[in-house]
Each structure stands twice: as structure tokens, then as C-alpha cells.
Image (spheres, rainbow, N blue to C red):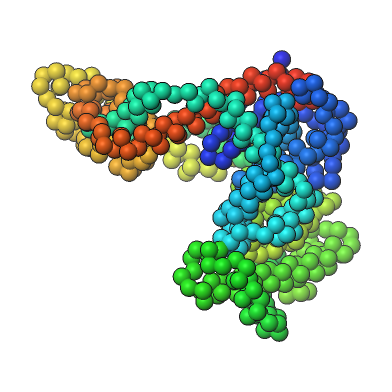
């Protein structure tokens, strides 16, 4: 039986930025060989809508998905340690299904629409920042050279991706059409529910106020440590690695870069770049001279980084040419060249070194090292290049209590204080009901019990932030409690991670009719888009479970 779309996955694919969120499909596909760009493929790709999928169609969809992911994260999905290979193949087949469905419905886009979509992507501020271009639109040739070519992709892949993204957007609109059928009366009622404000008070029960009441005993601490590890593996450390590394920071090459640029017509290069990109590409620059200064600085830093990478290459070659291949060769060659070797603290694959800011590829490379293949690099970041050597591999383990006693003690005290806070909050509900029945108001009942009630500013279900909560409860939880409580009443005790709260709804405030009249058209349009997305996602779940039965992703389904 094929699995269904997961509702709560660790990573979600945005089919249309800002519009539709689709959970990935939970099937496995493990084809047999790799293409040049790193995705696994096999001889039989299955069928979709009666059409037998070819190898080229699979590769095209693979390249499109890689671009789709890159434009949202500015890294390639196969370099994210959180993403498994079968997850990638699931997404490739999902994209194949969507584009094939669009063809069966006769959905096509013009060359002009595809070009417009591609142009919007290249004008994305995030893209220019990712390439260090300070906001200007990225030329196609530069995008091909710096992004596509290193991954084995081409301008044709980008054009096809842009075209199919528009196709998928139109498919969303077609399949989500039923969701857009909203009457003006329904939109008005939904607006009123979303913008109706309440006047409320709240009292918190937080663990910090009960810490002094917690008694820590050796037996209690040992039991907590044991249970925490048995039930939740709370203190288990992941597989970790330590590496020795040599850093080639671009700041050490700035003077050399300036000297090299001084031998050229740098001013002409700067003026040419300014004429090409203009002031719009430099939002932080107030004047043309400031924009030119930014360009000059970027050119100098780019050459400095290139010089750093060249020296890192020379160093790496010297290290790997040493025989026999041993991790100690890094330090030996570094000493000969007058370079400094540093040792990282142990780090896991998900978070990377904590003692300095390393590029994401640093961690991934470190976890590929073995005693027989102990070197990696140069690893190029935004500000430095690194050559690394394996120092130590540390397997996953649970440290003994004596090694982490302070941390366990702190966690134990917090847990006990939270339980005390929650017990106090639950008990106060009954006391509060009696006090209010005898004529006391919410605030006086709290003060009598030694508590500190707070007045909240008016808020509604559409309120986006409430700074007065100060992290003691989530806004959504307070909204749910308040709008589930009748005016003039106190709600139940609501638990939070470090205690809880009770909210008292004083009154419902009159709706601002003039604001409603102004906002309703835009609200209605947004509501229709939301309903379209909901309808599309419902269709997608049914369609994927039916159509992907005839593809390799069904082979390992549970």
C-alpha cells in the first residue's frame, strides 16, 4: 500500500513561493546508478498517466527540482545532510507527475511568460546576495557560470525549469478552482472572525518562580537522568568528528588584491559594472560614488578570495603529495610553510563547528574523511578557504552522569519547577471560580493569591505579534484560549513548556467597520488563494497516491 503525504515533515517544498506548501511524499526509490550530477537513476522509470517515463525525462525533472530547491535555499539539496537520497527521488517523481498532469490537461505557457518568470528569478534580491552582488539583477551568463555549470546544469535546464514552474502554477489554479468560490457574505463573516478583538487579562505561572522550592537529591537526580535517556535519549550525543584545519582568510590577501588591481584599469571596470547594473542594484548606496565604492570593494574581495583559494590549492597539493598518506602530514606541511594549524572542537553533521563560522560544505566534507582518506579541501566559503585533516572520530554515546551533572541538575530543577508551576495553576482555577462567584474580579482574586495579573492590549485572531507575552506563551495558544472563552469569564489553565497561564476575557470590542470596508477586497482575494491552495493540496494527495503506484517510488512503500 502506497503511503500518504506526510502532514508534518522536517522539510516542506514550496511549490509556489508564498502560496502553496506541499509536504513531500513518503515513498522510497533506490535506483541503481548515478548520473554525472549525483542523482541515482535506474533503467525502469515507470509510467505516469499512461506515459512511459524516459531516462531523459527523469533527468530533466531531477535538474528542475534541484533548481527549485536552490532558488529557495541557495544550496543544492544533495548537500543538505537532513535530506536523504530517497527524499530527492520522491520529489523528482512528484514534479514529473505535476508536469505530466499539466500536459494531459493541455496547460502550456508562452515563451514570453517563461522568459518573464526566468527574469523574475534572476532579479531576486536573495539570488544576488547569494552571489555577493549587493542586490543587482544577475546576468544569465553569470548565473550559468557560477551556479549552473559547477553542478553540471545548463541554460536550457534553467529555461525548462522556469517554464514548468509557470505550468505548475497554472495547474494549481486549475485544480484549486473550487476553493476560490467564496461568496461576499462568507468572506465578510470570515473577516469578522479574524479581526474581532478582545480585551483580556492574563496571569502566568512560570517555573522560575518555583525554583527555590525544588530540592535536588542524588536519588532523584539519578532517576531523572536514567528516565531521560531511556525514554527520550535526551543526553545522547550524535556521531561527531574533530578535524585539524588550516584557514586561508581573504583578509590576509586584500593588500595583494589591491596591488594586482592597481596594475589594471580598475576604474574602468568599476564604471562598466555601474553602467550595467545602476543604482538599483545597490540599495544601501546613497550616491553613485557610494555604489562605485561597493563595486570596487567587491572586486577587491573577490580577487582576494581567489588568491586565498590559489594558495589553499597549492597547500592541499603539497599535503596530498606526501607519502604515506597520514593525517599528520597537514601539520608537517603547514609548519614548513609557516601556516597555523587549528583543531576544532567535536561537532556533529547537522550543526558544524561551533568555534568559528564555517561554510555548510565544511561539515559535510569532514564527515566523509576516513583514516585511509584523511584530507579534504580546499573548502571554499564566503570569507575563507580551508584545508582539513581527520583528527578524531567520536561515535554516538550517552555521557555518564558525572560528566554532565551540572546540565542534568539544571534540567531536573527546571522540570520539577515546571511541575510545581503547573500544579499551582491548576489549583488556582478552582480558587478563582470561588472568588469570582463571591463578587471579586479577576485582578483582585489574583492579587489575593499573591499572583501578578497583566492587562494585554486588544488582539484578534489575525494579530501577528504580542510582545507583552515576552516568550512566556505562544501567541497562537493565547489566541486559542481567549477566543474559546466567553466574555466575562476566565478560561482553563493552559500548560506551556515552563508552566502555564490563565486568561480572562473582559469583553469583545466593536469591529472597525471603516477598516473592514477598506480591507475586505484584499482579504477576500487572499482568502480565495488560501482556499485554492487547500483544494489543490487535497487533490495532490489523492492524485499522488493513485498515479505514483506505477513508478519506482512505490517499490519501498510501507
On-image quarter of the C terminus: top right
Q: Nearer the viewer, residue 110 or 17?
A: 110
Q: Residue furthest left?
A: 439
Nearer the observer, 385 or 320: 385
Quadrant in the picture for the N terminus: top right
Picture coordinates of residue 440, whole percent (x, y):
12, 25
Name above or below for residue 251 compared with residue 96: below
Q: Can residue 548 be seen in this view?
A: yes
* Image point (63%, 64%), residue name: 383
Where, by quadrant of the figure, is residue 554 drawn?
top right
Q: Which residue lies furthest to the top in this view?
A: 1
Looking at the image, residue 155 lies above or below residue 415 = below
Query: Left of 129 or right of it: where is 469?
Result: left
- Residue, x 79% and y 66% (percent of image)? 313
Quadrant in the picture for residue 130: bottom right
Going by the image, does 325 lie left or right of 96? right
| The quarter of the displayed image where residue 376 is located | bottom right
Q: How many labels does the image show?
A: 0
On screen, residue 276 above or below 17: below
Most extreme residue toward the bottom is 263
Question: From this viewpoint, is residue 493 visible?
Answer: no
Measuring from the top left, give residue 254's x and y in whole percent.
Answer: 64, 76
Residue 547 vs residue 33: left or right? left
Q: Going 53% across and 67% down the picture, which residue do you hit?
A: 279
Could you say which is closer to the camera, residue 353 or residue 145?
Answer: 145
Task: Give the vertical position of 257 relative to 51 (above or below).
Answer: below
Q: Residue 382 at x, y = what percent?
A: 64, 61
Question: Residue 24, how many percent across, how many down?
Answer: 64, 30
Residue drawn at the location 72% of the way across and 47% of the way down:
158
Amino acid at each position: 500500500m502506497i503511503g500518504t503525504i506526510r502532514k508534518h515533515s522536517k522539510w516542506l517544498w514550496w511549490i509556489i513561493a508564498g502560496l502553496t506548501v506541499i509536504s513531500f511524499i513518503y515513498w522510497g526509490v533506490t535506483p541503481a546508478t548515478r548520473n554525472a550530477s549525483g542523482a541515482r537513476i535506474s533503467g525502469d522509470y515507470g509510467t505516469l498517466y499512461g506515459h512511459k517515463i524516459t531516462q531523459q525525462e527523469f533527468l530533466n525533472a531531477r535538474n528542475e527540482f534541484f533548481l527549485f530547491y536552490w532558488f529557495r535555499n541557495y544550496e543544492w539539496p544533495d548537500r543538505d545532510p537532513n535530506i536523504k537520497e530517497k527524499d530527492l527521488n520522491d520529489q523528482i517523481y512528484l514534479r514529473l507527475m505535476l508536469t505530466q498532469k499539466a500536459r494531459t490537461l493541455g496547460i502550456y505557457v508562452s515563451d514570453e511568460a517563461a522568459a518573464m518568470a526566468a527574469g523574475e528569478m534572476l532579479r531576486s534580491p536573495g539570488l544576488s546576495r547569494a552571489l555577493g552582488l549587493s542586490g543587482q539583477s544577475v546576468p544569465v551568463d553569470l548565473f550559468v557560470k557560477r551556479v549552473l555549470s559547477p553542478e553540471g546544469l545548463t541554460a536550457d535546464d534553467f529555461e525548462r525549469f522556469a517554464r514548468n514552474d509557470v505550468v505548475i502554477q497554472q495547474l494549481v489554479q486549475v485544480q484549486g478552482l473550487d476553493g476560490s468560490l467564496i461568496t461576499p457574505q462568507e468572506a465578510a463573516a470570515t473577516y469578522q472572525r479574524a479581526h474581532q478583538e478582545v480585551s483580556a487579562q492574563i496571569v502566568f505561572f512560570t517555573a522560575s518562580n518555583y525554583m527555590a522550592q525544588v530540592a535536588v537529591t542524588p536519588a532523584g537526580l539519578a532517576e531523572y537522568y536514567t528516565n531521560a535517556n531511556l525514554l527520550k535519549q535526551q543526553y545522547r550525543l550524535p556521531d561527531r568528528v574533530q578535524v585539524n584545519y588550516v584557514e586561508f582568510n581573504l583578509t590576509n590577501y586584500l593588500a595583494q588584491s589591491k596591488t594586482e588591481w592597481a596594475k589594471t584599469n580598475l576604474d574602468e571596470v568599476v564604471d562598466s559594472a555601474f553602467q550595467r547594473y545602476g543604482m538599483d542594484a545597490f540599495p544601501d548606496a546613497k550616491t553613485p560614488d557610494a555604489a562605485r565604492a561597493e563595486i570596487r570593494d567587491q572586486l577587491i574581495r573577490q580577487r582576494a578570495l581567489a588568491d586565498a583559494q590559489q594558495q589553499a590549492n597549492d597547500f592541499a597539493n603539497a599535503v596530498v603529495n606526501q607519502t604515506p598518506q597520514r593525517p599528520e602530514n597537514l601539520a608537517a606541511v603547514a609548519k614548513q610553510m609557516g601556516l597555523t594549524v587549528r583543531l576544532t572542537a567535536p561537532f556533529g553533521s547537522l550543526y558544524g563547528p561551533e568555534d568559528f563560522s564555517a561554510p555548510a560544505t565544511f561539515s559535510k566534507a569532514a564527515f566523509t574523511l576516513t583514516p585511509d582518506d584523511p584530507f579534504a579541501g580546499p573548502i571554499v566559503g564566503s570569507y575563507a578557504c580551508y584545508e582539513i585533516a581527520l583528527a578524531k572520530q567520536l561515535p554516538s554515546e550517552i555521557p555518564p552522569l558525572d560528566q554532565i551533572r551540572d546540565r542534568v541538575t539544571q534540567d531536573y530543577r527546571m522540570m520539577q519547577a515546571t511541575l510545581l508551576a503547573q500544579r499551582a495553576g491548576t489549583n488556582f482555577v478552582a480558587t478563582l471560580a470561588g472568588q469570582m462567584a463571591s463578587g471579586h474580579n479577576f485582578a483582585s482574586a489574583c492579587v489575593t493569591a499573591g499572583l501578578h495579573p497583566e492587562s494585554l492590549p486588544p488582539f484578534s485572531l489575525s494579530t501577528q505579534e504580542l510582545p507583552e507575552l515576552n516568550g512566556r506563551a505562544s501567541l497562537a495558544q493565547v489566541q486559542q484560549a481567549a477566543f474559546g472563552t466567553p466574555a466575562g469569564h476566565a478560561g482553563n489553565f493552559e500548560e506551556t513548556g515552563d508552566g502555564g497561564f490563565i486568561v480572562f476575557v473582559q469583553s469583545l470590542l466593536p469591529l472597525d467597520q471603516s477598516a473592514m470596508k477598506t480591507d475586505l477586497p484584499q482579504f477576500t482575494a487572499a482568502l480565495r488563494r488560501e482556499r485554492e491552495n487547500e483544494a489543490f493540496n487535497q487533490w495532490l494527495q489523492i492524485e499522488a497516491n493513485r498515479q505514483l503506484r506505477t513508478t519506482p517510488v512505490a517499490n519501498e512503500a510501507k
